[in-house]
């Protein structure tokens, strides 16, 4: 508790705690990445609605989005209706994929911009696209984005570890899915992944 601490000290403590949490998260991610490489990623799979997972992950990133003045939106292709996107997946792991892609999109967005998550079903696959209006991807960095420790020297706001996309790829590939990056016209990046669909488990 901060009971008897002055406001100024309180904010210093909050910053120290936050940076400590960031370091711990980084160490955890690093350990996970190596463990996945060595032992293979062990998934705990159940029927998961990717739409609900996208919503809850976006909600947990609202504070980051607000601090960057970035708007988040969730769409279902041409339809205005909420859809269910059932996959046989590991909810905790897939949440990390969403969180990494969304955090990247937010961090690469200009202030006032919108990050869109577009969800849909195509040819028996659930398809997720996280789209931003940032600087996009240079042709020479395209082949390296999903490599371990790769970091571009783009004008980003936060410094990371170069592990986010690598971990996302480990997780998606463990689900027998695919993950990719593309540029968006007129401007911005799209990071997408697709996973085999399953039918609504309540049928
Ligand atoms: N939305 C994006 N727009 C442009 N470049 C991106 C985007 N997301 C990721 N990148 C590029 O891919 C690199 C690797 O991303 P990531 O693995 O998440 O590492 P980190 O975020 O720690 O730099 C980033 O350093 C950046 O160069
Ligand atoms: Mg990242």
Image (tube, grey):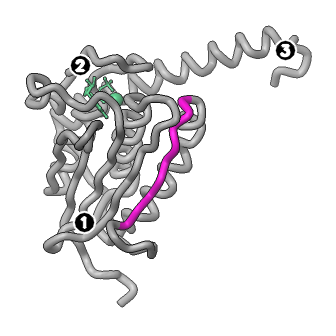
Check mark 3 vs ligand 2: CB closer than 8 Å? yes or no. Answer: no
In percent of width and height, residue 145 lies at 18, 30
At 43% from the left and 35% from the top, the residue drawn is: 106
In percent of width and height, residue 159 lies at 39, 17
In percent of width and height, residue 202 lies at 39, 86
Task: Give the vertical position of 34 relative to 201 (above or below).
Answer: above
Of the image marks 3 and 2, the number of the one nearer the N terminus: 3
Q: Is residue 96 magenta?
A: no
For the residue pair 73 and 98, the one nearer the viewer reads as 73
Mark 3: few, some, or many residues within 10 Å (few <14, many ≥20)?
few
CB within 8 Å, label 1 to label 3: no
Q: Is residue 5 left or right of residue 88?
A: right
CB within 8 Å, label 1 to label 2: no
Which numbered marker is on residue 152? 2
At 51% from the left and 37% from the top, the residue drawn is: 70
Which numbered marker is on residue 6? none
Q: Is residue 73 left or right of residue 37?
A: right
Foreground mark, 3 or 2?
Answer: 2
Of the image marks 1 and 3, the number of the one nearer the N terminus: 3
Q: Would you name the residue on which mark 3 appears? A: 7
Report how far apart the C-alphas of labels 1 and 2 lie in the structure: 29 Å
């Amino acid at each position: 508790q901060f009971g008897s601490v002055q406001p100024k000290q309180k904010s210093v403590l909050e910053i120290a705690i936050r940076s400590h949490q960031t370091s711990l998260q980084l160490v955890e991610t690093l350990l996970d990445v190596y463990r996945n490489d060595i032992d293979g990623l062990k998934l705990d799979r159940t029927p998961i609605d990717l739409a609900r997972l996208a919503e809850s992950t976006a909600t947990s990133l609202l504070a980051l989005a607000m601090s960057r003045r970035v708007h988040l939106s969730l769409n279902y292709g041409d339809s205005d209706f909420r859809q269910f996107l059932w996959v046989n997946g590991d909810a905790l792991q897939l949440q990390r994929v969403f969180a990494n892609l969304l955090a990247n999109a937010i961090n690469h967005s200009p202030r006032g911009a919108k990050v869109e998550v577009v969800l849909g079903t195509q040819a028996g696959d659930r398809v997720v696209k996280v789209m931003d209006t940032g600087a996009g991807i240079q042709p020479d960095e395209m082949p390296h984005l999903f490599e371990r420790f790769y970091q571009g020297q783009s004008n980003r706001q936060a410094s990371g570890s170069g592990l986010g996309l690598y971990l996302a790829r480990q997780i998606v590939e463990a689900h027998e899915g695919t993950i990719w990056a593309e540029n968006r016209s007129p401007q911005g990046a799209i990071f997408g992944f697709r996973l085999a669909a399953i039918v609504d488990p309540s049928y």
